Image (cartoon, rainbow, N blue to C red):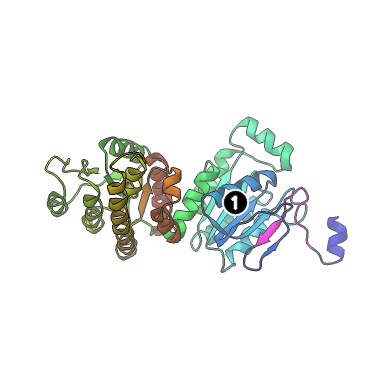
Amino acid sequence: MVRTARKGGIRLIGPNCMGNFNTATNFSTLRQELTVDKGEIGLISQSGGFAWRILECGTEMGVGFSKFVSTGNEADLHLEDFLEYLAQDDGTKIITAYIEGLREGERFFTLAKDITKKKPIVVMKVGKTEAGVKAVKSHTSAMAGSDTIYQVMFKQSGIIRVDGVEELFDVASALLRQPLPKGNKVGILTTGGGFGCIASDACERLGLELASLSPHTVERLNAILPSRWPHANPVDTVAAGFSAIYPCFWPLMEDDNIDALLAVHAVGWPVIIHERTSISSPLRPKADQLFTVQEEEELTGLDKLFDYMDKYRKPVIISGELNEAMKTSRTFSKLKENGVLMYPTPERAAKVLAHLVSYSRYLSH
């Protein structure tokens, strides 16, 4: 097939692939219909079937795609060809890839070192274990090789390596919207002490440092929170109510000691409280009225928070309770419209922030 195609000046994708699409032109050769949002994330996958799951997961998370290609067994065109193409594509801001093995490792490395200075590359590379290597070889006949070599190559070329599909899009989406932090000092804002403990542990495990609050920040927080607040980072609002949450954001964002902020069970608080008020409760009518007022206040607060993120060049990574009430709320829609994801656990949010810090360090060297 390849010899015949080349005689006619034709290039081939595959075989054993699922097709490709370009959302800018509404062109698709996918074997099944899948509705995807237009966006700025490009995806290359050496798997066909699993690529479908990757696309489904991204769609469920609200991710928009620019272009996608399933490369299959790569009899002619290789993953490296599409990496080079997406690097030159103005419609693609983030390149993501599912990799089983590389046929042109040296070319990949050379390309990646150049591309990652301009566009992030986020990769899910399988074949870490002996069993995984055997599975890869039987699947696409790709030479998986030593995972240690891949790991070193990814690190030296600035590629962000993730362990799963959700993490792939967690990180890619954050890179699209969030400013890159100047350092690894993190501020944590939470509505419960337990959440702060979990977030603190997650940050330290990932090499992130809890920032020391400046005396001026502590003074400003004292004016907002009850005297029982910890007077330290993590900043626990100690059940002071919704009215105390957003005012705490501003001094933390303005504190020069803080490079990034983790908001854990802070954004979306009115939605959580309203959902927990029983419909049959006699307090429900008043709860509905209060929720409407607080929801409007939160939407205004989020607009200001987005402005602060851009003004102070600090990422705000949000973790919250992702139930159906939250997913259908105006708060969630506002986050989505502004390219900000809400992560279901503090650990997942901290991992995203750790990737942003690592990529920022790479670019600064």
Quadrant where the C terminus sits is: bottom left
User: Would you say residue 227 sits in the magenta stretch?
Assistant: no
Residue 303: x and y in percent read 33, 63
Near-viewer residue (237 or 181): 237
Residue 139: x and y in percent read 72, 39
Q: What residue is shown at x 53% (from left), y 57% (from top)?
A: 113
Residue type pointed to by label 1 = Ala
Which residues are the magenta region? 11-22
The correct choice, above or below, for 204 with respect to 58 in the image is above
Residue 191: x and y in percent read 27, 43
Tell me where residue 230 sits by quadrant.
top left
User: Would you say residue 18 sits in the magenta stretch?
Assistant: yes
**What secondary structure is the stretch in magenta mostly built from?**
loop
Tell me where residue 233 sits by quadrant.
top left
Residue 178: x and y in percent read 40, 58
Q: What residue is shown at x 63% (from left), y 56% (from top)?
A: 35
Quadrant where the N terminus sits is: bottom right
Tell me where residue 236 sits by quadrant.
top left
Q: Which residue is mark 1?
A: 97
Q: What residue is shown at x 25% (from left), y 37% (from top)?
A: 193
The correct choice, above or below, for 263 with respect to 147 in the image is below
Does residue 90 appear in this view?
A: yes
